[in-house]
Image (spheres, rainbow, N blue to C red):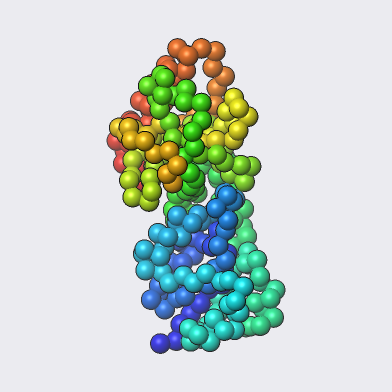
Amino acid sequence: MNKVCLFADSKYLTKHFLDKFNKNELIIFTYNQANDDFDYICSNHQLNLFKNDGYQIVEIDSKKYFKSLVDQFNVSKIYTLKSFSKLDKLIEVFPNTIIEDDLHLISKSKEFLINANSVEFKKLTGFNYTFSGIVTLCNQLGRTINFPTANILTNPTLKIKSGVYLVKCIVDDHIVKYGMGDNWINRNNLMVFEANIFDFDKDIYSKKITFEILKYIRENKKINSLDELVELLKNDRSTCLKLLEDNYE
């Protein structure tokens, strides 16, 4: 069977674009992003969901040339995205490549992330924004006030708005819970995302955790006392639990 292929950077794949194709006839050749790079539309977690959904995805490495990939998989038609990092090289080898312009989609998606508009982000891409990290030991203040948190270190490439979110939490790719997470710079001047996971008390330090953004709750506030912090967290928890009754996915 002749195949159709798509050359793309995995970070800019979207479900709405892939839905244009018959997945049984499509091969996706991708360059993957680094684990500490959060500046993407499609995370490595989302890429694995595509694979689990039946998409054939082949990572391009330095030993795989475009022509050899096309020949190996008996490709009859070649597509690429305008955002593809090796676009000029691909066109040089295959001048008849069909180029899909995704630059506006990327720009709008990032705008939605910066403005905490998770609903419009999902409408445009077909999925929620996710990001992952290794749970790190921080100051453990949350544990002392009965709001223990799972913390990951982030960096300036994480473009989501600072503040509190309702999130889905996936631990080691299989334990799924919900929680409330805060994107902020802590008192040690570290960029972190920390989440209080609802109905969960296991030790997950050094474990991989993935956060899926569901809804923005509020902006960060200056806190003057522990009592004020506890009251604020209780309100956040109540807000999130009420939202979960609406079956956020």
Which picture quadrant has residue 160?
A: top right
Above or below 137: residue 160: below
Residue found at x 42% / y 60%: 48
Residue found at x 59% / y 24%: 187
Q: Which residue is at the front of the view, 12 or 198? A: 198
Q: Is residue 176 visible?
A: yes
Q: Which residue is at the front of the view, 193 or 127? A: 193
Q: Is residue 243 visible?
A: no
Which picture quadrant has residue 1?
A: bottom left
Residue 13 point in image, percent of width and height: 52, 62
- Report how many numbered discs are placed on residues in the image: 0
Above or below 66: residue 108: above
Above or below 76: residue 105: above
Residue found at x 56% / y 71%: 60
Q: Which residue is at the front of the view, 155 or 113? A: 155
Q: Is residue 64 left or right of residue 228?
A: right
Residue 134 point in image, percent of width and height: 48, 44
Residue found at x 50% / y 54%: 43
Which picture quadrant has residue 158?
A: top right
Above or below 67: residue 226: above
Residue 67 point in image, percent of width and height: 59, 84
Q: Is residue 95 left or right of residue 20?
A: right
